[in-house]
Amino acid sequence: MARKSKPPESPASPVLETVVITAAAQPALAPQPVRQQPVQTPKPAPQPTVQAEAPAIPVPRYPLWRRVFFQPRVLFLLALAAVGGVTAPHWRGFAPDLGGRSEFRVGPDQVHVTPPPRWIPRNLVKEVFDQGISDGILPESLSLLDDNLNATLADAFSAHPWVDEVRLVKKSFPATIHVDLAYRQPVAMIEVPQGLYPVDIRSVLLPPADFSAEQAATYPLIRGVRSAPLGGPGSAWGDPVVLQSARLAATLGANWKTLQLEAIVCPKVSTSESPGVFILASRGSHILWGKPPGTDDPGEPTTAQKVGRLEKYIADYGAFDRPRGPYEIDIRPFRVISRRPIIQNPTSYRMEDGERR
């Protein structure tokens, strides 16, 4: 065994001891078992916690009108309009009266109507104002600011006998009124003991004073009427015979002069259920027309066919009393036009009532 040698002591440095262990002196070490380190499995990543949502509260589905009107802005405007409507009548008392100013006054010169045809009097608007004031329909003065102005003027124009319909009344500033009218048209003159009375296609009496003798002669003449008009101008005559003869005159009016016709002779009685025979007079001849338009009988030619027969006769002979007339001419048969002379018995027709003897 080796001896330990002590190095010289030094008072200034600490003592270091070296131990030398030889191989023979080392004790045998028992083998140490190998410790197995536990295998650590990776921890799964933490998953986000999902919280269950609370059940949704159903939102009621309101009607469209409620969703539109029940809005703050809409409710505010409605409330403002309601307040304005309630207070407006009270505020008018504080507003200046503009109705008397000239730019708001309405008279005949400020009213413009649909251009009238030639048979309408030129002073129609003035007549409407005069008649309206006289009948109490129009006040003495009219204002453009009157809320009922359009309706008032419409009533006044409707009451005039020449006006068939008031279609539109429109006002504008400065004071101007535009009135859209439909006018009545004369189709015939009714011959009665009192004189001649003009009527339209619906047998409405028109103002006789608006026709001169020359103008009245240009319209078809209707004879044999035994009734009198039920009212004044602007009202219907009230007799079916006059109504049917007026329709016949309107049918023949365009060809009245070409066909050389002189008058329509009415039967004593003629209704829609039992229409009578109407006669046309021309140069002493009597033309049996038959039933009036609107009551066409399947046993007679149509209105257009009858007019065609009259035109053909004029084209072939030049007049209804030719070649050796006058004649009784019957255009009612389907196949041919029949005629016979009435020279030997010129009174075979009573022209005042249109009946054969």
Image (spheres, rainbow, N blue to C red):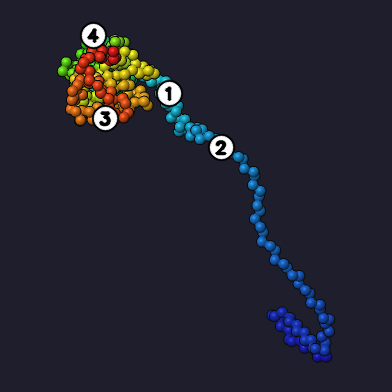
Residue neighbourhood size for the residue with mark 1, other residues' Cα within 10 Å, grouped as few (<14), some (14–19), many (≥20): few
- N-terminal of the pair, mark 3 or mark 1, is 1
**Which residue in the structure is indicated by mark 3?**
308
Q: Looking at the picture, how far across and down is residue 267, in whole percent? A: 30, 15
> Which is more foreground, mark 1 or mark 4?
4
Q: In this view, does 311 lie above or below 52?
A: above
Amino acid type at circle 1 is: Val
Which mark identifies residue 193?
A: 4
> Could you say whether the residue bearing mark 1 is in a helix, strand or loop?
helix
**How many tags in the picture?**
4
Amino acid type at circle 4 is: Pro
Residue neighbourhood size for the residue with mark 3, other residues' Cα within 10 Å, grouped as few (<14), some (14–19), many (≥20): few
- Cα gap from disc 1 to disc 4, whole angstroms: 68 Å
- N-terminal of the pair, mark 4 or mark 2, is 2
**Which residue in the structure is indicated by mark 2?**
61
Amino acid type at circle 2 is: Arg
> Which is more foreground, mark 4 or mark 3?
3
Camera-nearest residue between 181 and 244: 244
Instruction: Classify residue 286 as left or right of residue 93.
Output: left
Work out which residue is located at the far front of the displayed protein and give it: 344
- N-terminal of the pair, mark 4 or mark 3, is 4
Identified at 37% across, 18% down, the residue is 274
Which mark identifies residue 83?
A: 1
> Which is more foreground, mark 4 or mark 2?
4
Q: Can residue 246 be seen in this view?
A: no
Instruction: Classify residue 98 as left or right of residue 322.
Output: right
> Which is more foreground, mark 3 or mark 1?
3
Task: Examine the image and state in which quarter residue 264 appears.
Answer: top left
- Cα gap from disc 4 to disc 3, whole angstroms: 34 Å
